[in-house]
Amino acid sequence: MLTVLLATRNRSRILKQVLASFCQLRSPSSGWKLVVVDNGSTDSTYEVLRSYENQLPLEYRPEPTLGKNTALNTGLAAVEGDLIVFTDDDVFPKPNWLVEMQSAADKHPEYSIFGGPILPRWEVPPPRWVQWVEQSPAYAVTDPSLEAGRVSPRLVYGPNMAIRAGLFTADTRFNSSIGPRGANYAQGGEMELIIRLSRQGHKAWHVPDAAVEHLIRQEQLKKSWVMQRAVRFGRGEFRLGYIEEGNDPDQSLGVLDELKRELIKEGLKIVKATLLLRRERVFRCSWRFHYLRGQIIEARSLARKHRFATRLASIDN
């Protein structure tokens, strides 16, 4: 048996469509259940979930504390079976999704983490400039050329990943300080867990036939949204690439001067490209500029929190 786990917040219209697609899923021979954690919704999410109780093996869990990873940790208490398949409330799975995930887990017992393809599902036709966007960090879609086999943990994304349930011990949970928590946050909540597990020796396998479609909403096709995403991506990458490697958070201020120099360089590139009317160049440099902004924001934030914690510890002692 396996459990599908997702968190949702104020997306009742899309959630209703997602749950309708779940009704078309083929069930693994050992069965499955769906755990949906409502992360403090104020719309009709509860009513939508209730309407599917007789159509899906659904279990509802409330979690009022804001934060996707907090909600996922709450949902772990309701898990049954030996495999947990994680996804999002705007993801539409192919009918054989769970069958393929369970089959891969059964065939490759030496692997503990599984990821599948994530394809874009455009709510409206995308503008031409979307081809300039870095698709993976912006829209959480995967490289379609990936084949079955071992992959880097960095290529397993939250909208379509499975982890053996036995890996979740009392000390192994999602880090609630990273990932969606309102408007401003460091991106990469699920990735932080995947990297942590991989450092413990757990390997990842790509399952090309376990595909899902990730809804790209109309508001996500605005340049302002994409640039805000670049900031979140930069924050998350700083956290994952610098702090998670065991560096002292107080040392994060040491890279600020370098990051600021890089930011100035990208700003000058934007000005030059604008004068030359090179729109694609302007866009790509702007993405890099906002990415660096995110890194600077996270470096300052982590150093500030670390110093505050250090002062409290000295007072207590």
Image: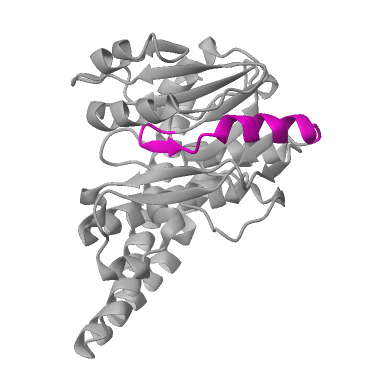
How many numbered discs sit on the rendered protein?
0
Note whether 147 is above or below 303 in the view shown. below
Q: Tell me which segment is drawn in magenta.
A: 88-110
Residue at position x 48%, y 27% from top?
314
Residue 30 sits inside the magenta stretch: no
Residue 93 sits inside the magenta stretch: yes
Residue at position x 52%, y 51% from top?
251
Q: Nearer the viewer, residue 172 or 190?
A: 190
Note whether 150 is above or below 179 in the view shown. below
For residue 187, which quarter of the picture? top left
Note whether 88 is above or below 70 in the view shown. below
Q: Nearer the viewer, residue 303 or 9?
A: 9
Residue at position x 43%, y 32% from top?
177
For residue 114, which quarter of the picture? top right
**Can residue 299 be seen here?**
no
Specify whether 44 is left or right of 86. left
Q: x, y percentage for residue 289? A: 33, 67
**Can residue 183 be seen here?**
yes
Q: x, y percentage for residue 45? A: 25, 19
Residue at position x 70%, y 50% from top?
148
